[in-house]
Image: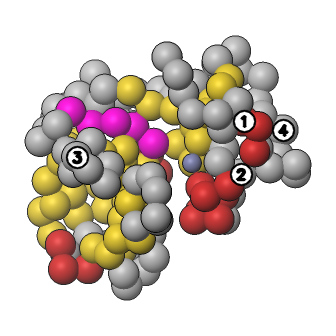
């Protein structure tokens, strides 16, 4: 396990955060929204323990895109870096983007979800992880 707190931030360095408890779960999302949002084929995120995410710098830079349904996408309004998603009804349900961490967050993605929408140009890796056509059900 890495030392706690885990630390991370956005590309411009304006937003800095820490996670004070071990991450709960992680996975790859291949949904169309994640493709649009990141410009990549899939996005890796990890669920944090409730109350364990703290913004230590640049809270005023954090913007949110709230779709009409589903999780809000929070990002740095200056550099555009993806930071985390947040449940619209329970703000403590948060999925931090793995790429936002400074170093090894100690967890590994354990599933692929929304593979029915996976990008045609990027084959899903043959990594033995379970695949869910829609959202993860287990
Ligand atoms: Zn930034
Ligand atoms: Zn997604």
Spot the residue most to the right. 120
The residues bearing labels 1 and 3 have C-alpha atoms spaced at a distance of 26 Å
The residues bearing labels 2 and 3 have C-alpha atoms spaced at a distance of 28 Å
| Residue neighbourhood size for the residue with mark 3, other residues' Cα within 10 Å, grouped as few (<14), some (14–19), many (≥20) | few
Asked if marks 1 and 4 touch (Cβ < 8 Å), the reply is: no
State left or right for residue 48 relative to residue 118: left
Asked if marks 2 and 4 touch (Cβ < 8 Å), the reply is: no
Q: Looking at mark 2, is its residue's CB closer than 8 Å to ligand 2? A: no
Where residue 90 appears, as percent x and y from the top left, is 22, 46
Helix, strand or loop at label 4? It is: loop
| Residue span colored magenta | 45-49
Helix, strand or loop at label 1? It is: helix
State left or right for residue 91 relative to residue 41: left
Give the mark nearer the N terminus: 2 vs 1.
2
Closer mark to the observer between disc 4 and disc 3: 3
- Of the numbered discs in the image, which one, if any, rests on residue 90? 3
Q: Quadrant of the N terminus?
A: top left
From this view, report whether residue 104 is shown above or below residue 130: below
State left or right for residue 67 relative to residue 125: left
From this view, report whether residue 65 is shown above or below residue 126: below
Disc 1: which residue: 115
Where residue 43 appears, as percent x and y from the top left, is 57, 48
Q: Is most of the magenta stretch helix, strand or loop?
A: strand
The residues bearing labels 2 and 4 have C-alpha atoms spaced at a distance of 9 Å
Which residue is found at the position 40% from the left and 67% from the top?
66
| Residue neighbourhood size for the residue with mark 2, other residues' Cα within 10 Å, grouped as few (<14), some (14–19), many (≥20) | many
Where residue 23 appears, as percent x and y from the top left, is 29, 31
């Amino acid at each position: 396990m890495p030392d706690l707190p885990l630390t991370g931030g956005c590309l411009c360095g304006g937003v800095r955060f820490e996670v004070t408890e071990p991450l709960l779960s992680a996975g790859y999302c291949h949904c169309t929204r994640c493709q649009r949002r990141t410009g990549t084929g899939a996005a890796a995120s990890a669920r944090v323990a409730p109350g364990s995410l703290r913004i230590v710098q640049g809270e005023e830079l954090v913007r949110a895109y709230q779709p009409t349904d589903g999780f809000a996408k929070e990002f740095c309004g200056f550099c555009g870096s993806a930071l985390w998603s947040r449940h619209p009804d329970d703000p403590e349900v948060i999925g931090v983007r793995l790429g936002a961490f400074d170093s090894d967050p100690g967890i590994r993605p354990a599933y692929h979800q929304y593979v029915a929408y996976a990008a045609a140009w990027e084959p899903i890796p043959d990594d033995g992880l379970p695949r869910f056509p829609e959202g993860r059900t287990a």
